[in-house]
Image (cartoon, grey):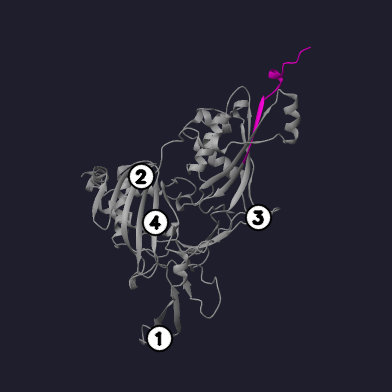
Amino acid sequence: MKIDLGQMCVYDKAVKYVIEAECREPLHIGTGNGESKDVLIHPEENRPFVQATGIAGAFREFYQGNEALQVKLFGAAYKSDEETEGKTEGNEAKSRAFFTDGFFGKSAVYTEIRPRVRIDRKMGTAQSVKTKGSEKQSGQKFEMESVAAGSCFSFSIYLYEKGEDLETEMEWALKALHQGRIQLGGQKSNGCGYIKLNSVKKAVYDLYDRGDRKLWVEENKAMDEVLSKVLSQGETGEERVCLTLSAQTEGGVLVKSIAVTEYGKDVPDAVNIRNHRREYILPASSVKGVIRSQIEKIADYRNCAESVTEIFGRESENGQGGQAGKIRCFDCVIGETESNDKIQAQSRIHIDKFTGSVMYGGLFSEKVACGKLTIPVELEGSSEREIGLIVMALRDLALGIVPVGSGSGIGRGYLKGESITIKKGEELLAEIDCRGGRIIHGASYVEQCLKVLGRNGEG
């Protein structure tokens, strides 16, 4: 009797991808426990890793605009409401795509700990909240740990098909990951989770073929490198609008790093924060905080405060009502590392307000960072009002109206802008010469973005 494999087999083809990836920006995969916001460490391997659920969730979210394809790849979520009246059952509810954990190499993996502080929007100062069960006020300074940019990890994807082609769709998503359309982990608005693909290997197993079935048991079929094919896939969706401010520091910038990182007689008490490459940086969280603060003022004056929520999102209350932001900020390298290393620390003193004399033990030193820097900001969508708000905030940074970091009272943190560019993909929408005070390209576009910011939404 002839056996019909097509009737017996649940799937007729299995596809395996092995992906070697590199962090373009810091990657935060938190444990969810404690105030230190530590990076997730595998209990057996004792090294950072990216959970398979996090990778699968990011890929699933990418297809949220195509529910039919999302269900086909990742299965249907169980629901119980008036429309479904029960649970979705059958093969259509099963996921066709399976992901493994992403493990970083045992060597050459670095982590960074960044100091952070929550700001009270009304007061413009660090928040303090009452500790539960007591009358004490607790500060809102905390530390955030991330896997450093440049760290490499690998993970695998399995696809199971029957009479269909899901490989093109999965490779489309892999290209989106490479382009930054898919981000992994948390702190996305602070520029974390951008990934670059270094290698994509693929093996296809024909489950009708006896030889392939034997190879599938051990998964030892020769794999082909398909990275170039993946990156040549069609467009992955609308490009984000990127606004870039090129500037030069005036008087230096100081965003203080963790209090104690080095020891020695000549080591300053405070130094600008650095990444694992020892580059002096303006962290993405500081960039976002300054831009948000200025946008809130502009939006309040222009009577379009709702745009602030659209750009930056809002926190959920009791686990409901949260909204993800559209903006993405990034770490900005300040000047040249060698030049900044040579800058001498500046000594300062604490003055006793009552006696007018130097406080005992009040001598301290600080080391700033100087040089050119580029501040990129990405925005999902192309809302002219939202772009107009960001342009005005970047303009205020460029004109030295708004400082970054600490020490603005003694002339630190002010920038001298050179240019602001607005791009959508490779298309240049506008270019502004900050020093000359003129629009070089795209004057009509900039004027339209600013026009919709008129009071009550009118020009």
Neighbor class of circle 1 (other Cα within 10 Å; few <14, some 14-19, many 20+) is few
Is mark 2 in CB contact (under 8 Å) with mark 1?
no
Pinpoint residue 8: horizontal percent, then vertical percent: 71, 20
* Label whose residue precedes the other's in the sequence (2 or 4): 4
Question: In the image, what residue type sits under mark 2?
Answer: Lys
Q: Is residue 188 left or right of residue 403?
A: right
| Residue annotated with mark 4 | 374
Quadrant where the image shows the C terminus: top left
| Residue annotated with mark 3 | 47
Q: CA distance from mark 3 to mark 1?
A: 48 Å
Mark 1 or 4: the one toward you: 4
Q: Secondary structure at mark 2?
A: strand
Mark 2 or 3: the one toward you: 2
Q: Residue furthest left?
A: 459
For the record, the magenta segment spans: 1-18
Question: In the image, what residue type sits under mark 3?
Answer: Arg
Question: In the image, what residue type sits under mark 1?
Answer: Val
Does the magenta portion include 7? yes
Q: Quadrant of residue 220?
A: top right
Neighbor class of circle 3 (other Cα within 10 Å; few <14, some 14-19, many 20+) is some
Question: In the image, what residue type sits under mark 4?
Answer: Thr
Mark 3 or 4: the one toward you: 4
Residue at the image point whose x is 68% and y is 56% from the top? 46
Q: Secondary structure at mark 1?
A: strand
Q: CA distance from mark 2 to mark 4?
A: 15 Å
Q: Which mark is residue 423?
A: 2
Q: Is residue 455 left or right of residue 114?
A: left
